[in-house]
Amino acid sequence: MLNRAARLLGLEAKASPSVAPDATDSESASWLATIFGAHRGMTGVSVTPDSAMRCPTAYACVAVLSQAVAQLPLHLYGRTAEGGKVRATEHPLHALLSDQPNDWTSAFEFRQAMMSSALRYDQGAFAWIGRVGGEIQELVQIPSPAVSVETDPYTREPLYKVTERNGRQRTYDRTDILHLKPLDGIAPLTAAREAIGVMIVMERHAAKLFGKGARPSGVLTLPKGLSIDALRKAAASWNKAHGSEGASGTAFMEDGTTWQQLQFSSVDAQFMELRREQVIDIARPFRIPPPLLQELGRATWSNTEQLGQQFLTLCLMPWLKQWEGAIRRSLLSADERQTYFAEFLVDDIVRADLAARMEAYSKAITNGVLNPNEVRAMENRTPYVGGEEFRRPMNTEKPGAAE
């Protein structure tokens, strides 16, 4: 079945009526491409969620976002009567989110794998919710290609059909699946598919170019009157002696034979500039600033910090809200939602240098916004006795308060 699908995607054979009734070759290829995740773009390159990861820029986009989400602390909080919040460490879900969702997967690995799937597959990422006695005990990721999402025609609730390795299909209720949906229902990699195809073609061109010693081809002119066999032997002898292995060697030619090397065209001369622009084009659907992909053409000392803030606000924060919403929807009951909620800590991303951070802490303590022990907790330091007291400037005291 897979071999036949590959042939159809390559348009090497006609469609079988049992597979796609009343369909043309192109329609059958498109139909099978939807099933197997393959897509042959305008460049003629088939780009799938797996093959796209062999493109360095696409891999970097997925890695930057998935690893950023995975390394951020994720905690379950409980609301207090005073309107504040405390970490709900006593709740069993807290350990699953912040430490280990199952016995063989860490929280970092789980969130990284889920984010990678959500960035590559239009249907998103899925995890099975294992409950014992109504209490959540583990979260296990399900491969995205094995899941199809259907909508109940009456209630509009989603139903998840999972195809197992033996071909059996199981249907799960929405309460049994943690579903991380892509923004707008389209994965960023799908939106960047044509741009990734262009980058792959350019990578192949660069490989062929440097395989020939980073020099363009030339024309070998032989004396007139030679037979076709003689021309073939001369060309084969030349390529064997002065191909990619001996491209920098010295050429010895017989009498009457000349060699004319071709020059780089204007397109070849701007090849590196085109590749740089292609990196930006792939990064657009992911909303990743180019400096985070090692494209430093427009990065300066003055705008690097602003680019980090842009990455958090416009790129990372919408995905964090997707995570928090999915956890609230699937992992908390209606009663628990009144008290508990999950939240990412993004302080490490926006944290400035040490001098600026200490100056901000000093102002917060002086003006009574934070107490010293709260600042020490933010810096992962132990509290001290008396550090829980808030300070206020002398000029903000009421008249007579000093007496």
Image: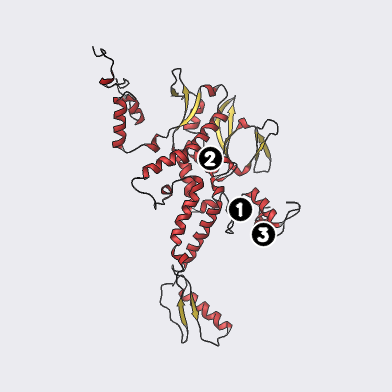
Give amino acid for label 2: Met
Which of label 1 and label 2 is nearer to you? Answer: 1
How far, Cα to Cα, is label 3 from label 1? 13 Å
* Earlier-in-chain disc, 3 versus 1: 3
Q: Amino acid at mark 1?
A: His
Q: Which residue is under mark 3?
A: 11
Q: Quadrant of the C terminus?
A: top left
Image height check: is 18 above or below 321? below
* Dot 1 crowding, Cα within 10 Å, few <14, some 14–19, many 20+: many
Q: Secondary structure at mark 2?
A: helix
Residue 399: quadrant of the picture: top left
Where's residue 40, x and y in %?
61, 55
Query: Residue 388 in the image: x percent, y percent?
Result: 32, 21
In terms of depth relative to the viewer, which is nearer, 358 or 141?
358
Helix, strand or loop at label 1? It is loop
Q: Earlier in the sequence, mark 2 or mark 3?
A: 3
Kindly identify which residue carries mark 2: 114
Bin the neighbour count of mark 3 within 10 Å (Cα to Cα): few under 14, some 14-19, many 20 and up. Answer: some
Mark 2–mark 3 distance (CA, rounded to whole Å): 34 Å
The mark that comes first in sequence, 1 or 2, is 1
The image quadrant of residue 351 is: top left
The one nearer the camera, 160 or 246, is 160
Near mark 2 (Cα within 10 A), the count class, few <14, some 14-19 or many ≥20, is: many
Residue 104: which disc?
A: none
Task: Name the residue beneath numbered marker 1.
Answer: 39
Instruction: Locate residue 122, reporting x and y percent.
Output: 59, 43
- Amino acid at dot 3: Leu
